[in-house]
Amino acid sequence: MKFICLGYSDHSKFAAMTESEMAELMDECFAYDDVLRKGGHFAGGEALQAADQAVTLRHRNGTTEATDGPYAETKEQLGGILILEANDMAHAVQLMSKHPGVKVGPFEIRPADETINAMIDARNQATQ
């Protein structure tokens, strides 16, 4: 099964880190990603720029409006995604609970919607 792991971070924790502490944390995260790769569990991922670089689209009154950034009432902002292959949710939780990224914020783990993803794949094939 494929799981999308949304990694959140409290950017004040990053701001408080020295350059060497940040480098150490990133090395730990990359090393664990390599463990996931070797086990056939790492299917991809993307780091995201800070939330203040985002644009949020909303449909209101028949039009689509763009606003700067997300306005969540939380210190934790989405920092990246990791695509994980696991047997089931319990296995996904077991794998991600060891990820060093949890030191700076939580991971939300969601099963990928294989039905809709199959529809997307079919549409992609049809338009090539």
Image: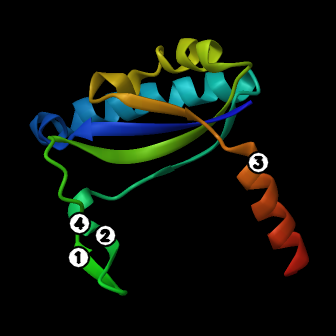
Callout 4: SS: loop
Q: Amino acid at mark 3?
A: Thr
Q: Which residue is mark 1?
A: 67
Q: Nearer the viewer, mark 3 or mark 4?
A: 3
Q: Are marks 1 and 4 in contact (CB under 8 Å)?
A: yes
In what quadrant of the picture does the N terminus appear?
A: top right
Give yes or no for contact between labels 1 and 2 (Cβ–Cβ under 8 Å): yes
Q: CA distance from mark 1 to mark 3?
A: 31 Å
Type of the residue with mark 2: Thr
Q: Could you say which disc has been placed on residue 69 in the image?
A: 4
Q: Earlier in the sequence, mark 3 or mark 4?
A: 4
> Residue 38 sits in which quadrant?
top right
In this rendering, the answer to whether 88 lies above or below 22 is: above
The mark found on residue 115 in the picture is 3
Q: Relative to 28, does residue 81 appear above or below in the rendering? A: below
Residue 56's tag is 2
User: Residues under labels 3 and 2: Cα distance?
Assistant: 26 Å
The image quadrant of residue 4 is top right
Q: Report the side of 107 relative to 111 (left or right).
A: left
Which residue sits furthest front?
61
On screen, residue 95 above or below 16: above
Distance (Cα) linking label 2 and label 4: 6 Å
Do tag 1 and tag 3 residues touch (Cβ < 8 Å)? no
Q: Secondary structure at mark 3?
A: helix
- Sequence-first disc among 1 and 2: 2
- Decide which of tag 3 and tag 2 comes sooner along the chain: 2
Looking at the rendered structure, the secondary structure element under dot 1 is strand
Q: Nearer the viewer, mark 3 or mark 2?
A: 3
Indicate the amino acid at tag 4: Gly
